[in-house]
Amino acid sequence: MQSGRRNIWVDGDACPKNVKEILFRAAERVRIELFLVANQFVPVPKSPLLRSIQVPSGIDVADNYIVEHVSPGDLVVTADIPLAALVVGKNAVALNPRGTLYNEENIGTHLARRNFMDELRATGAVTGGPDAFGKVDQQTFANALDRWLAKRN
């Protein structure tokens, strides 16, 4: 990890393949380090900028690793809103693979909505999850990533 430089952290266990490919290309293009953290080995293209970090299996082990290593100003790519809240609390930014950027101004609202939906699912009032990941989501993510990359300097 390069001190004083922003990095990209990826919650790799559930990150869509297309999103990982966008991230790998962007990291190479702008010369930023990317760390893909997962409970299983996830291959990354051969590059000194791209690293796959395998952590032991277990609930929140990858999340905890990311929170422990993230620095202010870093970007964390995750669909896990509680993880996003933790990294925002460390003055980092989180980006959902569908392109939603989580920051100090909006993380509370997203976390409250997530908790409310969990309660509804637990009572059986709501079943199912989000729609399938599609091309529009992929493009929205790529655009949000480009905006973050442009503002990071």
Image: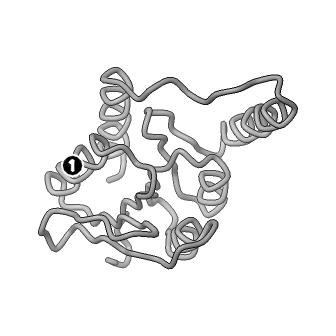
Q: Name above or below for residue 50 compared with residue 14.
A: below
At horizontal 37% and vertical 43% (from top left) the residue drawn is 148
Residue 32: give x, y in percent of width and height. Answer: 25, 62
Circle 1: is it few (<14), some (14-19), or many (20+) Cα within 10 Å? some
Left or right: where 136 falls relative to 61: left
Q: Image point 36% across, 64% down: which residue?
A: 36
Where residue 120 sits, quadrant-wise, is: top right
Using the image, determine if residue 79 lies above or below residue 27: above
How many marks the image carries: the answer is 1
Left or right of residue 151, residue 88 in this image: right
Q: Which of 57 and 145 is in front in this view?
A: 57
Q: From the top left corner, tell me how far across and down residue 128 is, in percent.
A: 64, 28
Residue under label 1: 26
Query: Which image quarter is the N terminus in?
Result: bottom left
Most extreme residue toward the right is 123
Colour scheme of the picture: one colour
Pick whichever, 16 or 70, lies toward us: 16
Which quadrant of the figure has residue 50? bottom left
Taking 41 as reference, is 13 above or below it?
A: above
Q: Is residue 8 left or right of residue 108?
A: left
The front one of 30 and 65 is 65
How far across and down, in percent of the image, does residue 149 sit? 31, 46
Picture residue at 21% right of the left edge, 49% below the top:
26
Describe the element under mark 1 as helix, strand or loop: helix
Residue at (44, 57) in percent of width and height: 13
Image coordinates of residue 140 in percent, x first then y, are 37, 27
Left or right, 30 with reference to 63 = left
- The amino acid marked with disc number 1 is Ala
